[in-house]
Image (spheres, rainbow, N blue to C red):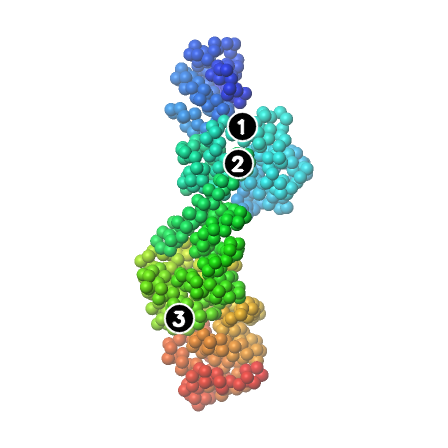
Amino acid sequence: MIDRFPDGVVLVELAAVAPDALDVAGSLTDAVQAALELRDAGGAGEPAVARLAAALGERLLVLDNCEHVIDEAAALIDRLLAAAPGLRVLATSREPLGLAGEAVWSVPTLEVPGAGADLENLAELSAVRLFIARAVAADRSFALDAESAPAVSVLCRRLDGIPLALELAATRVRALGVDGMVARLDDRFRLLATGHRGAAPRQQTLMAMIDWSWDLLSPEEQAILRRLAVHADGCTADAAEQVCSEPGALDILIRLVDRSLVVVQAGGRYRLLESVAAYCVAKLRDAGELEQTRLSHRQYYVELAELARPHLYGGEQRLWLQRLDDESGNLRSALDGAVADGDHELATRLVEALGWYWFLRGRFAEARRSLEAVPDSPAVAAWLSGFMYLQGDAAAAAVRDRCLLDVDARAEWWMSFTGSDAGDLAKCLEMLEHSLKSFTADGDQWGVAAVLVARAKHAHVRADQKALESDASESAAIFGTLGDRWGLLQATAWLGAQAELTGDFDEATRLHAEGLRMAEELGSWPEVAAELGWLGWTAVRQGDYAAAREYGVRGLRLATEQGHRAAQALTELVLGFAARRSGDLDEAERCLQDLVDAARRQDQPVLYLSIVLDELGFTYELGGSYAKARALHAEAFRISQDYGSTRAMCWALEGLAAALVDEPELAACLLGAAATVGAAEDYVVTAAEAGDLERATARVTGFDAAYARGSELSLEEAFALVSEVEISS
C-alpha cells in the first residue's frame, strides 16, 4: 500500500504501553513520536498532537494492539485525524475503536478442515499449510500424507485455526508425533506451554495469549465469559442470559463479541473457540461456580426440550426440529451431566421430552442408549420398546408388555406403530383400536390421524385396497389440516402403496417422489431411505430393473447409516428382486437368503418374509432346485395365511405350481384357485411379473379340468392338496 500514501507507512507497536502507566496518553504519543523518529513531541496535549499530525502528513499510520489501551488510543486517533486530513489509520485491536467513520474488518481464523476432507483438499487449507510449514521446520522428516492427514485434520480443527496454537503445536511434532499431539489436546495449555524465546510474552504460550485478553475484561465480563464455557457447540442469546444469570448479560455478550472472545455463528448463535472454552472452564472451577453453572445449563435445556415437545406434532415441526438440531450438543451434555450426577428426575424428564425428536431424526441408537441410562418407568419403557422394535430387537415385546397397562394413548400408539414391522400384527391392531377410542374421546386429532396411518400399513399387508385407500386418505386430510409434515409423508407413502397395488404405477411413482421430497425437506433420513425403497419397488413391478437397483443402492446406504431396519430390509428386497428378474440368480440368491436369515432370527415372522421366500423359491426353481423351491413357497403360504394376506397366498400357490414340474395336474389345480381369487380381488399381474406365471402355466397345458376344479376351491383348500411329500421331495 506504500504507493498510495505520499509520505509512506509507519508502524507503531502499542503492546509495550502499560495500561496502568501514570500517563497512558503520553505514552501513546511517545510511541508514535519514536516511530516517526521525532526528538520531542512535547507531551500528550494539543501541541503534541498538532506536531504529530504535521509530521504524519499523508501517511498510513498502523497502530498495532490497541485493545489494552482502547480508550486512550481511540482519543488519540480521533484527534490526529481531525488535525491531519490526509492521514489514514489502520488499527489492530480485539475490539472496535467506536469512532465515527470507522470501517471494521474482522480478521477470520484460518481455514480449518471439515470432517472427511480428502488429502488434496486438506493441503489447500490455510490452517493446514501453516501447521505443515512449521512442523517441517521443526522436523524435516514430517510430511502430510495419507497416514498423518487424519490427525492433522483433527488437530487444526480442535485448535480452531488459531495461528499461535498451530505454531506451538508444530514445535512438539518431533517429540510427540501428530497423533500424540491429538491424544493430549485435552491438556492443551500444558502441552503448548513453551514457545519461541524471541516472541513477546503474550505470544509465547497459548495460556499467555488468552491471559492477555482475559486480563483486559471487567469482573462482570469475566463472569459471563467463563459461564458461557458450559455450552456445547454454542448457544442462543436467550440461553446465555438464562444460564449465565448475570444482570445485563446480553449487553456484556455483545461486548465480548466486539472483543473477539465470542464468535457469532449463523442463525444468531454464540460460540467460544475450543481453547477459550477450555480456559474458561478452569476459571469457572477456580471461581467455585462450575457445578452451579452446569446445573443451570441442565435445567435450561430440559425446559427447552419440554417446550419443544408439543411443537413437534403439527405445523411448527420443521422449525422446532431445526432448533433442537442446533442444540444437540447441549442436550447431550445436559443428559450426560444429569446421569453422571445421579440427577434422575431431570434426566428422565429430558429423555421423555426427546423421544419423538430422536425418532423423527432417525437417532435410534442414541435414543436407546439414553433411555437405558435412566431409571425405568412406564413412559421410559414405552419409548424404549419402540426403539428396540425399530432396531429389530426381539426383546421389545417383553418391554412393551410390562408397561402397556400404565401408559397413555400416545405411548400405546407408539408401541403398536413400531411393533407392526416386527410382525405382531394382531396385538398391534388391538392396541391401535384401543388408542383410537382414547384419541376420539379426547378430541386428539393428531392421534386419530396417527392410528389411521398405522392401520393403513395393516391394510397393505392384507392387500385390503379399500381399507388402505380409506385410512390413508383420511389420515392425509387430517395431517394436512394440522400441518404435520411427518404425518402427511406417512399417509402419502401409503397412498402410493395403494396406487402400486392397483397397477397405477405412474401415480405410485408420483406419490413416492412427493414423499421423498417431503422427507428431504424435513431432514428425516430414515424416511428418505424408505421412500427410495418404495420407488425401487415400483420400478421392480414395472420391469425397470436398472432404476430399481439405483434406488435400492441409494436407499440401502442411507438406511444402513441410519440403522433403520425396516427401510434397510425394503431396499435389500428391491435389490434381490431386481437381480433375480434381470437374470443374476447368484446375486439374487445371496441377497434374498440374507433377508430370510435375518427374518428367521426374529421370534416372530416379519412382514417381508413371505414375499422374499417366494422370490427365493422362484430363484431356486429357475436353477433347477425344485424341492428347495417348493419348501420355500409352502412356508410363504403359511406365513401369509397367518397374516390374512390373500395376495401373498396367491403368489405362494403360483410358486408351488411352477416348482411342481412332475405334478402338472396338481399344479393346474393350484393355478386355478389362485387365478380365481386374484380375479375376484382385482390383483394386478404386470408384464414384468407375467413370466413366472406363464412358465408355470405352460407346464399344465391340457389339464383344463384340473384347472377348473381348482377354481372352485379356496386358497386353503387348494394348499391342503399339496402333501408334505410333494413339497419336500
Residue 440 versus residue 603: which sits nearer the camera? 440
Question: Tag on residue 454?
Answer: none
Mark in the foreground, 2 or 3: 2
Mark in the foreground, 1 or 3: 1
Quadrant position of the C terminus in the picture: bottom right
Q: Residue at x 45, y 88 (%)?
A: 706
Is 379 on the left-hand or right-hand side of 475?
Answer: right
Question: Tag on residue 212?
Answer: 1
- Image coords of residue 34 (percent x, y): 53, 14
In the displayed structure, 213 sits above or below 590; it is above
- Quadrant of the rendered structure where residue 205 is? top right
- Image coords of residue 152 (percent x, y): 60, 42
Mark in the foreground, 1 or 2: 2
Q: Residues within 10 Å of mark 1 (few under 14, many from 20)?
A: some
Residue 307 versus residue 475: which sits nearer the camera? 307
Q: How many marks?
A: 3
Is 606 on the left-hand or right-hand side of 443?
Answer: right
Q: Quick one: label 1 or label 2, which is nearer the N terminus?
A: 1
Q: CA distance from mark 1 to mark 3?
A: 69 Å
Check the image and name the residue furthest to the bottom. Answer: 705
Q: Helix or strand or loop: what does disc 2 sit on? A: loop
Q: CA distance from mark 1 to mark 2?
A: 22 Å
Q: Residues within 10 Å of mark 3 (few under 14, many from 20)?
A: many
* Residue denoted by label 2: 288
* Residue denoted by label 3: 459
